[in-house]
Structure formats: C-alpha cells, structure tokens
Amino acid sequence: MSNEAKKEENANDMNPESAAEMPQASASQTPAEAPQDDVQKMREQMLRAMAEAENTRKRMDRERDDIRKYAIVPFARDMLAVSDNLHRALEAVPAELRDSDPRVQSLLQGLQAVENELQKIFERHKIKRLYPLGEMFDPNQHEVMFETPGTGKPSGTVTLVVEAGYMLFDRLIRPARVGIAKDADSSGPSPAHSGGTVDTQA
C-alpha cells in the first residue's frame, strides 16, 4: 500500500471525539488583537492619571498663590482700625483751632503725614482704599447706611461716605459704608442692608 493511501486511511479512522478536542481558530479575533486591546486600555488609564495629576498640581498652585496673596488679611483689618482712628482725630479738630494755634497746625501736619504714609504702605501691599463719593451704589463694594431724598442727584448716587472701604487685590476686606440719594417717589426695594461679600475665612 502506498504512503498516500495509508495517510488517507488514518484520517478516516480518526476518533470523532479526538477531532472535536483539537483547538479551533477564532474567526472573530486574531491572536494579535488581544494584546492591542490591553495596550489601548493601559494607555487610556495612563492619560486619565496624567490629567488628574495635572489638575491637582494646578489646584495646589492656585491655593498656594491665594495663601501668599491673602495671608495679610487679618493684619490689614487691624491696621484699618488704626487708619480710621487717625482720620477721625484729624477731622475732629475744629477749623478755627487749626488756623489760630501754630502748635495745633504743627501737630495736624504731623498726623496728616502719618496718615499719608500709612496709605502708601497700604498701596504698596495692594490694599486699595474705596471712597466712592459721587459714584453710583455698587452692592459688591458698598454697604448702605441710610438714604436721603431730595438731594437733586440720581437715585443710588453716593452722597456721603461714612467709612471708607478696602480691597486686597480683588478681594473685599471691608465694604465702604455710605449714604445714598433716593427719589422722593421711589417705590423700589431699599438697598439699606446691601453690602459686598467680605472675606471672613482669611
């Protein structure tokens, strides 16, 4: 019997169960596709992790910048009280006494120089004074103490600054307390309790 005839006979005699146990190649996925899917998943995970790390870094940078910029807020508030008292002392001296007594004049000049220097220090540390006389009321920066009708000015105009306000960079540390003009026939809601949002967590 020839070799080809023997091979054909052996093939015909193969056990069907043995034939079923032979591995079958998948028609839907080649052996190279499975590793490629794993690589793609790992790449996506890596990109997400990198994005989260970058967002965390930016957030920490912003927090560090805020801490550095606004660290002096408590000290600035304490110094505002000093500035207010100094300004009140200057305003309390009667006009006739200012002109009649050279000693009082010298004292006032010294106090005025101290107040001017204090304001320069504020400006150097980015503390901006708000003195909105003649401006329109701004609820983000002003607090209305009273309203005055019959001033001849548009309603909402600041007619008196009771106490100056201050900002540190773009953060309000104290609103300007003001009086505003009001139309006699105005029926709109009163902004008397309005005021900017003051930073209370610094």
Image: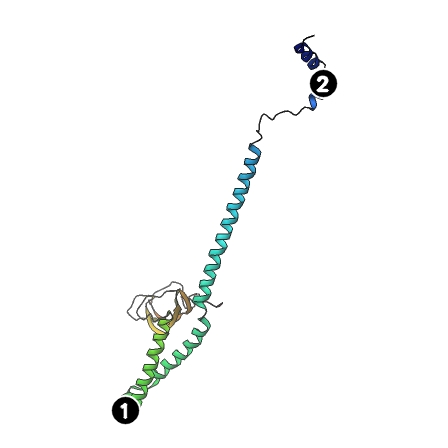
Residue 197 pos. (x, y %): 44, 65
Residue 103 shows in the view? yes
In the rendered view of the protein, which quadrant contains the N terminus? Answer: top right
Quarter holding residue 32: top right
- Seen as rendered, the residue at the extreme left is 99
Q: Residue visible at 70% across and 24% down?
A: 21
> Dot 1: what SS?
helix
From the top left corner, tell me how far across and down residue 114 is, in percent.
34, 81
Is disc 2 surrounded by few (<14), some (14 to 19) or many (20+) residues within 10 Å?
few
Residue 120 sits above or below residue 10 on the image: below
* Badge 2 amino acid: Pro
Q: Looking at the picture, does residue 1 appear above or below residue 42?
A: above
Q: Residue 152, labelled with which disc?
A: none
In this view, the residue farthest toward the top is 1
Q: Which residue is mark 2?
A: 16
Upstream in the sequence, badge 2 or badge 1? 2
**39 versus 128 height, above or below:** above
For marks 2 and 1, give the CA distance. 126 Å
Pick the front one: 168 or 155: 168
- Depth check: 33 or 133 in front? 33
Q: Amino acid at mark 1?
A: Pro
Q: Residue at x 55, y 42 (%)?
A: 42
Which residue is depicted at the point 72% across and 21% down? 18
* Front-most of residues 95 and 119: 119
The residue indicated by pointer 1 is 102
In the image, residue 145 lies at what x, y percent?
A: 40, 72
Residue 103 found in image quarter: bottom left
